[in-house]
């Protein structure tokens, strides 16, 4: 299936390439919404998102191929715990007239960002990184941009993240499925 999608993607890009030729494009964005869609752990409650913060950066080369970095923290409802995610992306701007349509893939890692106070008064604070191993994360995403003037566009993005691999250091078991979606808003400058 992946080979078919990549072949269609490559053939379409070669046959329909008609985007303006700029030397470089820089993109900056922020997440505006998040959801955690993974199932509830056995015997536990479903994990829900309660806000997101971070940034998305991208640099696109003249032939439509680009590289990006995502870094965001999704707050978990009912406490101060967060899912801290960092990604590296490869994306392509499709040769579609009127709008800037981007498709991309990313990979990176994720960890739980939290602290626990054990014992009572004067006890030490233990961070989640002491209990859990970083998990691997993948994503696919799309972005649609509206050019306001030839050198500037505003875009809306949608990311679908698979995050099932955060594990307990002692037992080696997966501690939950933090897969979900993130929507973002950003701007791009073409030089």
Image (cartoon, grey):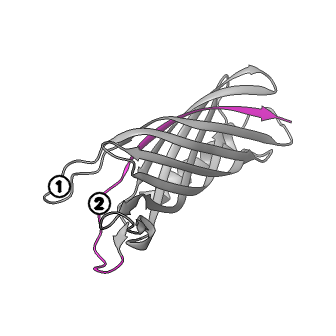
Q: Could you tell me which secondary element the residue under label 2 belongs to?
A: loop
- Residue 103 horizontal/vertical position (percent): 57, 43
- Residue 125 horizontal/vertical position (percent): 42, 65
Quadrant of image for the N terminus = bottom left
Tag 1 near tag 2, CB within 8 Å = yes
Q: Residues within 10 Å of mark 2 (few under 14, many from 20)?
A: many
The structure residue drawn at horizontal position 59% and vertical position 37%, both measured from the top left corner, is 30
Q: Which residues are magenta?
A: 169-191
**The residue positioned farthest toward the front in the image shown:** 121
Q: Could you tell me which secondary element the residue under label 1 belongs to?
A: loop
User: Which of the pair 137/60 is nearer the observer?
Assistant: 137
Above or below 43: residue 140: above
| Quadrant in the rendering for residue 77 | top left
Q: Which residue is mark 1?
A: 44
Above or below 128: residue 47: above
Q: Which residue is mark 2?
A: 176
Is 14 colored magenta in this rendering? no
The structure residue drawn at horizontal position 62% and vertical position 44%, both measured from the top left corner, is 56
The structure residue drawn at horizontal position 31% and vertical position 78%, both measured from the top left corner, is 172
| Quadrant in the rendering for residue 116 | bottom left
- Residue 104 horizontal/vertical position (percent): 57, 48
User: Which of the pair 75/159 is nearer the observer?
Assistant: 75
Above or below 58: residue 118: below
Quadrant of image for the C terminus = top right
């Amino acid at each position: 299936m992946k080979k078919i999608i990549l072949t269609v993607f490559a053939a379409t890009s070669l046959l329909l390439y008609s985007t303006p030729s700029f030397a470089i494009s820089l993109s900056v964005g922020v997440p505006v919404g998040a959801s955690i869609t993974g199932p509830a752990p056995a015997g536990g409650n479903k994990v829900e998102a309660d806000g997101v913060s971070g940034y998305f950066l991208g640099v696109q080369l003249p032939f439509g191929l680009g590289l990006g970095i995502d870094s965001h923290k999704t707050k978990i409802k009912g406490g101060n715990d967060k899912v801290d995610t960092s990604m590296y992306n490869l994306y392509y701007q499709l040769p579609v007239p009127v709008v800037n349509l981007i498709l991309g893939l990313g990979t990176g890692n994720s960890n739980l960002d939290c602290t626990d106070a054990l014992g009572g008064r004067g006890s030490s604070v233990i961070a989640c990184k002491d209990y859990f191993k970083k998990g691997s994360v993948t994503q696919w995403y799309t972005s649609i941009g509206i050019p306001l003037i030839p050198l500037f566009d505003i875009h809306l993005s949608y990311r679908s993240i698979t995050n099932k691999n955060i594990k307990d250091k002692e037992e080696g078991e997966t501690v939950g499925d933090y897969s979900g979606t993130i929507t973002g808003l950003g701007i791009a400058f073409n030089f």
